[in-house]
Image: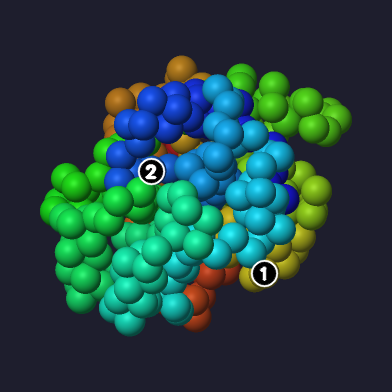
Amino acid sequence: MLTPMLPWCQPALVSLSAAKQQGKLPHALLLGLDAGFGAEELMRHIAQMALCTNVQASGACGQCKSCQLQQAGNHPDFYEIYADGNQIKVDQIRGLCQSLTQTAQQAGFRVAIIFACERMNTAAANALLKTLEEPGAQTLLLLQTNRIGQLLPTIRSRCQRVLVQEPNRQQVRDWLSENMTLDSDPCWCLPIVGGPLALAQALTDGRYQQLLSLRQGWQQALSHGHINATLQGIIDKHMLDAIGVFYLVIRQSLLKNQQLTLVQRAALAELAGRLMRINQQLLSMPTINSLALCQDFVLEYKKVMDY
């Protein structure tokens, strides 16, 4: 069963539904949208719309045999590809391309989604190019990527872009308010959690409360010049979140503190940049002495503020 369409994704589905009704659906679509903003849900809605035999203005009808098969998860003309480990491998793409050459069992479209397609290795991307250059009739390839700049230009040039305007903070708040009760605005942590869907999950699984505790702990640490025991415990378990929250606290200081000198602003901007670089390094270097690193950052902040 498909999840309800997210409001910021609906215009893209409506536009493609009109193209399907007019017989103008392209053979390949590329969506450069992070999964946290509903990319996977939109891709599946587009797939069901393409397979639907009675397309409506807002998408698939949900009632035809094709829609029922899709909702049951066993449509014979629908394929999904995910990364096998860290990569999408050539055998996966070759197998998919071979399947797409077969006659559609439901006498309609054959549809395939490749999620996080930037993970295709070179051989896999080259194998896909052959199908993109010579697609079969009524074949639709849906490519979703979190990092469109990592795709080969030859892949990008052979796909029509699906354009989605990412929601602003007010739109995210409105959407969250329709689905849960909010005591305060949680959107400050969107850059950390990675999008509205991830934020909704964080609000229900306890992660948001941890982020709040981290923010409060960092604010106290920057005020007093040392990391208290409570913050130490959180950092040890949630280092990536801790660095992300620390970055936002520094950024807020830059935006809100009108008393900062130009020298202080430049130093804090450099500190914020170092935090982001460390954050990237932590993805491949998890054994770093996180507590010592964070204490150094706090001392550096205090030194800047004492200029």
Residue 268 visible: yes
- Label 2: how many Cα within 10 Å (few below 14, some 14–19, many 20+): many
For label 1, the residue is 237
Q: What kind of residue is marked 1?
A: Lys
- At horizontal 71% and vertical 40% (from top left) the residue drawn is 63
Please tell me whether mark 1 sits on a helix, a strand or a loop. Answer: helix
Viewer-closest of 3 and 301: 3
Residue drawn 52% across the image and 46% down it: 51
Q: Quadrant where the C terminus lies? A: top left
Nearer to me, 79 or 235: 79
Q: Position of residue 165 (x, y in %)?
A: 44, 27
Q: Is residue 25 above or below residue 147?
A: above
* Quadrant of the rendered image containing residue 117: bottom left
Is 106 above or below relative to 58?
A: below
Whole-percent x, y for residue 11 in the image: 49, 24
Where does the image place residue 77, in percent across and percent down from the top left? 50, 60
Which sits earlier in the primary sequence, circle 1 or circle 2?
Answer: 2
- Label 1 and label 2: CA atoms lie apart by 34 Å
Residue located beneath label 2 in the image: 31
For the residue pair 210 and 76, the one nearer the viewer reads as 76
**Which image quadrant for residue 269?**
top left
Q: Could you tell me how many numbered marks the image carries? A: 2
Q: Secondary structure at mark 2?
A: strand
Binning the other alpha carbons within 10 Å of mark 1 as few (below 14), some (14 to 19) or many (20 upward) gives few
Q: Amino acid at mark 2?
A: Leu
- Residue situated in front as seen by the camera: 222 or 186: 186
